[in-house]
Image: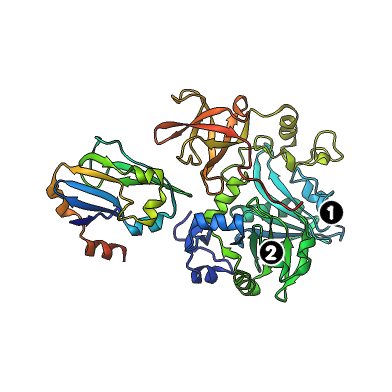
Amino acid sequence: MLKFTDEHEWLKIEGDVATVGITAHAAEQLGDLVFVELPETGAALDKGATAATVESVKAASDVYCPLDGEIVETNQAIVDDPSLVNSDPQGAGWFFKLKLSDPSAVNALLDEAAYKELIA
Amino acid sequence: MDDHSPLKQTPLHALHVSLGARMVPFAGYDMPVQYPAGVMKEHLQTRSAAGLFDVSHMGQIILRPKSGKIEDAALALEKLVPVDVLGLAEGRQRYGLFTNDKGGILDDLMIANRGDHLFLVVNASCKDEDFAHLQKHLGETCELSLLDDRALIALQGPRAECVLAELWADIATMRFMDVAEADLHDVPCIISRSGYTGEDGFEISIPSASAEDVTRRILEHPDVMPIGLGARDSLRLEAGLCLYGNDIDTTTTPVEAGLEWAMQTARRAGGAREGGFPGADTILRQFAGGAGRRRVGLKPEGKAPVRGGAPLFADAEGKVPVGTVTSGGFGPSADHPVAMGYVDIAHTANGTQVFAEVRGKYLPVTVAALPFITPTYKR
């Protein structure tokens, strides 16, 4: 199941774990990324907390935790090569995997059609 | 700024929009921050071939001596800048600074001797204040005009000379900081061999009515790409050039900013026209004895960019403050983060390690020589 937030993140949900990244729209708006900082594995984050930081040539932006949960895995590949987020934002450019405190909370997120309408 | 005040447009606004630029408010103008290629490609294009910038938002000012003698305009302007204007030969340009009574910097500018008048280029955000300042102090000696009928573009990079030589063969005879008049596509232009990127290149003042036509034709050359404000900032930062409002302002003196080179011998202690500019006491005292702090290059040791405003400390715990970052980002040509800022004089030696506070962490940063690239000016 693929869900979106109005902060331009995508969540691919498998059981109680969500793989989280930023949308192609967000990646394009940010421009060429040169630095990514990811959360620590094991960190418990609340919805809306700063989970990651991305920097383009010009500016730094925060990536927020889309739901309450615990970070169970992070994608070192985008730390080593931030341009992966620009070239494949909804694939190899994923950020982290989040074990959801309340898997039913995903129902409140946007589906793909609603997200497309948001950025239209 | 008042969100409701309408943004001004340069004569090239429609061109930017047609090229797919992302437009942002800058100094009261709606300006291109990047084109579809993006900041990284635009930056590297400028260093490897040629990049075209719209800098029409900057102020172009003419100072015409009422006496008809250029020396009178030069001496009048010397009352406001610590620069040798009298010694500036016809057809030559030089960097300058307007100073205030405390020795702070009101703006930085380019000054050209155009034979019967001086031609100034000042920052967009300061141009109305600069013009009022000039009017107040030079109004008796000079006829002043802030031109509103000319665009200004910059063509920068190693291919800039070849591109323009197809329009005007004599351009190759110009040296760094020369200023000349020439027709480009039958339009009378004022061309200087200067810029804000660390590359060889030119700035071209064009009558507004013809600006889009001339610019489109230059952009047709396969070596040229349009470049937005984003890459303009990363290019000038790698080149170690100050951005007014970030790296220099009314609270920084020319000596603190490391801009002593902009004060020629004639205006220094013992020179033929020593002092005689606002803040001369402070500036000449600092010139002789040094200032308590100084602008330096800063190379973050890790991959994280360190941005303007980040506090600097002598220690990794953030206990002993030693300065502030004034500009910082990623240097696409340097291929690492680059920054500049002010540090206490004890920490200015190249190789000194300090720590920048970024998101609650203290990141190691090394004081480094500016610029971060090797300039290719054709001296």
Q: Position of residue B350 (x, y in %)?
A: 62, 30
Q: Position of residue A19 (x, y in %)?
A: 24, 48
Q: Nearer the viewer, residue A56 or B151?
A: A56
For disc 2, the chain is: B
Q: Nearer the viewer, residue B205 or A73?
A: A73
The image shows residue B15, relative to residue B60, as above or below, that is below
Measuring 57% from the left and 58% from the top, which residue is drawn there?
Answer: B45
Q: Nearer the viewer, residue B122 or B5?
A: B122
| Left or right of residue B221: residue B164 | right
For the question of whether residue B35 can be seen, the reply is: yes
Q: Are marks 2 and 1 on the same chain?
A: yes
Q: Amino acid at mark 2?
A: Ile
Which numbered circle lies on residue B204?
Answer: 2
Q: Circle 2 sits in a helix, a strand or a loop, which is it?
A: strand
Measuring 13% from the left and 44% from the top, which residue is drawn there?
Answer: A102
For the question of whether residue B27 can be seen, the reply is: no
Dot 1 surroundings within 10 Å: few (below 14), some, or many (20 or more)?
A: some
Q: How is the image coloured?
A: rainbow
**Callout 2–callout 1 Cβ contact below 8 Å:** no
Q: Quadrant of residue B287?
A: top right
| Left or right of residue A101: residue B238 | right
Q: Amino acid at mark 1?
A: Ala
Return the residue at label 1.
B89
Which of the two labelled residues, at mark 2 and mark 1, occupies the earlier sequence position? 1
| Left or right of residue B325: residue A53 | left
Counting labels gives 2
Marks 2 and 1, how far apart in space?
A: 20 Å
